[in-house]
Amino acid sequence: MKEMSKTAVFPGSFDPFTLGHESIVLRALGLFDKIIIGIGSNNNKSSFFTAEQRLEMIQNLFAGNDKVEVQYYEELTIKFCRRVGAQFMLRGLRTSSDFEYEKSIAQVNQVMLPEVESVFMLTLPEHASINSTVVRDVLRYGGDVSKFLPANIKIEKYIK
């Protein structure tokens, strides 16, 4: 009997995709057969980069890794998981407040789609202070964000 492949969705706005995000994906590769980085539309956030730019940045970062796929979606994350056949939702945790927030979402998702299990990974200590909101603020005021982003993401290409 063929074993079912383990697919995880790693959802987020990824505006931009940070070292912490990259670390979660790279560390999770050993747990899953496929990771779909799902760039979700979040109406509560004003984006710095367009969806197309974020998609391109992340695709370029993981080019050549056939276990990682990047997609944009405009629906409930749990519906996206169902549509792509994912059995897992991967989430990174930096702080205890992240845990409380993610726990409540995971519990609602469990009721809505019990066949998708939430998997939480702790951010490495050196990435715990990095978050996209702060990186966006530094970018807005012309600061250097190279220490917070994967080396392969050439942010200059996307800033006018």
Image: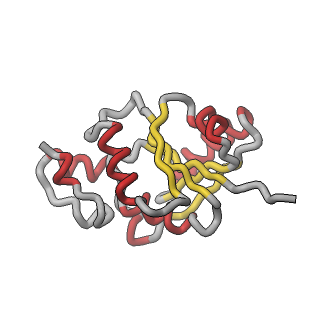
The answer to whether any part of residue 126 appears in the image is: yes
Q: x%, y% of residue 91?
A: 55, 53
| Of the pair 25 and 134, the residue shown nearer to us | 25
30 sits to left or right of 54: right
- Residue lying furthest right: 1
Q: Which image quadrant: the N terminus?
A: bottom right
Residue at point 53%, 28% (across, down) = 75
* Image point (48%, 29%), residue name: 74
Q: Image quadrant for the C terminus?
A: top left
- Numbered disc total: 0
From what the image shows, is residue 40 above or below residue 123?
above
- Viewer-proximal residue among 42 and 122: 42
User: Which colour scheme appears in the figure?
Assistant: secondary structure
> In the picture, residue 127 is in which quadrant?
bottom left
Residue found 55% across the figure and 60% down from its top: 67
Q: Is residue 157 above or below residue 114?
A: below
In x, y percent, where is residue 104?
62, 41
Q: Percent x, y for residue 106? A: 64, 43
Q: Is residue 24 visible?
A: no
Quadrant of residue 39 in the image? Answer: top left
Position of residue 24 in the picture relative to residue 108 (left or right) = left
Image x and y of residue 2, in percent: 82, 58
Depth check: 63 or 127 in front? 63
